[in-house]
Image: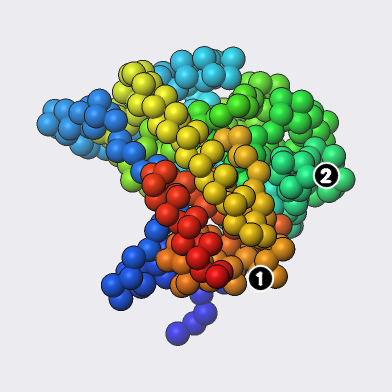
């Protein structure tokens, strides 16, 4: 058999699924595992969203729809962006996708040529670097520093910009650290992109999942008409991970060509799922409010618990639902520690190195679980060192 395309040897997987498989292997042996590895809310999809999907199926809204998304959902997104970002995109600026991940892939596929450079946070969501490598682009990870509360520093970005820089990826609130960039920091990155004629992909999937911090988008500067592409979706805020529904907003020409990618790759996003998305945006937001109230309590519990473990230190994340403790004083690297915690304590988390070299010396805990489970996990981790 001939070799596959070169890019297939550059693209990478995700540590979350690797450690989930390890945990499931333990469970098949009859061992209990407490799960903190997968980044999905443990709340059910709100009933009104499910009801809309059921009704749409019963009404036979199950066929092909426009490759770029149904008009009613685009209109709901227009209202959403106007309310949350302060501008109203045109219908032609919006592309509906089966999840947010295709938005990362299509944006980079549509903008980045081999040899172009892509700046992204490290540690960061693994797909950013993986797709850059797949496209044979120059990947330029910018290390997030704990002393800056893991916020991406615009000065660090400015130092790494070259005439080859094509795209800057922002993610605030951020996975895996839970950091939230300030308005001043985000505006500064937007200004750098404008000055140097660089595209921005702003991954805003956690935009509704904030604690003490406030959300701000770089798209405010150009209203996504020139260089800023907003990526958002329904998986996290509305507990719809398996529904696969997301969207991008950007310059009309870019979105139009990405729509052609959508036609070639996926035809369209599931019709009745799009109807459910309208209800998510236009219906009651009480389930989101209740979920974030629970996540705040869990955040406080897990940060307190992790800080009580010898040689662990953990900042308070300002968004999302991830804790990112420093374990450098333990003498183990992040993978050794994640394995120790899984096999000795029965707790599955992720090594920080799964999110890039900048994550070495840290772990990621997804606290999408009960406070009782959090407290039990902390105690079992403590016991594993005795």
Residue 377 picture location, percent across and down = 45, 56
Q: Quadrant of residue 77?
A: top left
Residue 20 spot, x, y in % from top left: 42, 63
x, y percent for residue 84? 54, 19
Q: Name the residue that disc number 1 marks.
A: 332
* Spatial CA span between label 1 and label 2: 28 Å
Q: Is residue 84 left or right of residue 374?
A: right
Depth check, front residue: 151 or 99: 151
Determine the residue positioned at 36% across, 21% down: 286
Q: Where does residue 375 sit, x and y in percent of width and height? A: 45, 50
Label 1 packing within 10 angstroms: few (<14), some (14-19), many (20+): few
Q: Quadrant of the N terminus?
A: bottom left
Give the image's coloring scheme: rainbow
Q: Is residue 145 above or below residue 292?
A: below
- Residue at the limit of the structure toward the bottom, as seen here: 1
Q: Residues within 10 Å of mark 2 (few under 14, many from 20)?
A: few
Q: Quadrant of the C terminus?
A: bottom right
Horizontal side of 277 relative to 125 (left or right) equals left
Label located before the other in sequence (1 or 2): 2
**Mark 2, residue position:** 156
Residue 378 versus residue 225 in the image, above or below:
below
Q: Residue at x 30, y 38 (%)?
A: 44
Dot 1: element: loop
Mark 2 element type: helix
The residue mark sitting in front, 1 or 2, is 1
Q: Out of 290 and 198, give the one closest to the viewer.
A: 290
């Amino acid at each position: 058999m001939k070799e596959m395309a070169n890019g297939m040897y550059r693209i990478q997987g995700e540590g979350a699924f690797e450690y989930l498989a390890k945990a499931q292997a333990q469970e098949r042996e009859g061992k209990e595992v407490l799960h903190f590895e997968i980044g999905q809310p443990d709340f059910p999809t709100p009933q009104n969203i499910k009801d809309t999907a059921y009704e749409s199926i019963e009404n036979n809204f199950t066929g092909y729809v426009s490759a770029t998304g149904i008009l009613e959902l685009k209109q709901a997104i227009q209202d959403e962006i106007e309310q949350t970002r302060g501008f109203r995109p045109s219908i032609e600026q919006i592309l509906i996708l089966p999840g947010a991940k295709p938005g990362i892939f299509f944006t980079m596929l549509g903008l980045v040529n081999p040899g172009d450079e892509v700046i992204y946070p490290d540690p960061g969501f693994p797909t950013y670097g993986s797709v850059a490598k797949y496209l044979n682009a120059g990947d330029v990870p910018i290390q997030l520093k704990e002393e800056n509360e893991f916020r991406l520093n615009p000065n660090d970005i400015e130092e790494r910009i070259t005439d080859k820089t094509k795209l800057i990826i922002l993610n605030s609130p951020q996975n895996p650290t839970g950091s939230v960039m300030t308005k001043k920091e985000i505006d500064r990155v937007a200004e750098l992109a404008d000055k140097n004629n660089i595209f921005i992909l702003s991954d805003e999937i956690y935009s509704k999942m904030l604690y003490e911090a406030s959300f701000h988008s770089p798209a405010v500067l150009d209203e996504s008409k020139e260089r800023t592409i907003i990526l958002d979706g329904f998986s996290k805020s509305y507990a719809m991970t398996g529904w696969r529904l997301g969207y991008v907003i950007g310059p009309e020409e870019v979105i139009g060509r990405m729509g052609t990618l959508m036609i070639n790759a996926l035809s369209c996003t599931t019709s009745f799922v799009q109807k459910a998305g309208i209800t998510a945006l236009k219906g009651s937001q009480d389930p989101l409010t209740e979920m974030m109230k629970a996540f705040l309590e869990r955040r406080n519990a897990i940060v307190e618990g992790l800080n009580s473990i010898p040689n662990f230190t953990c900042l308070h994340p300002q968004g999302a639902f991830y804790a990112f403790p420093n374990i450098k004083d333990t003498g183990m690297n992040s993978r050794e520690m994640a394995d120790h915690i899984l096999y000795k304590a029965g707790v599955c988390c992720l090594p920080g190195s799964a999110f890039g070299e900048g994550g070495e010396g840290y772990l990621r805990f997804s606290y999408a679980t009960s406070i009782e489970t959090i407290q039990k996990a902390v105690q079992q981790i403590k016991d594993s060192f005795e």
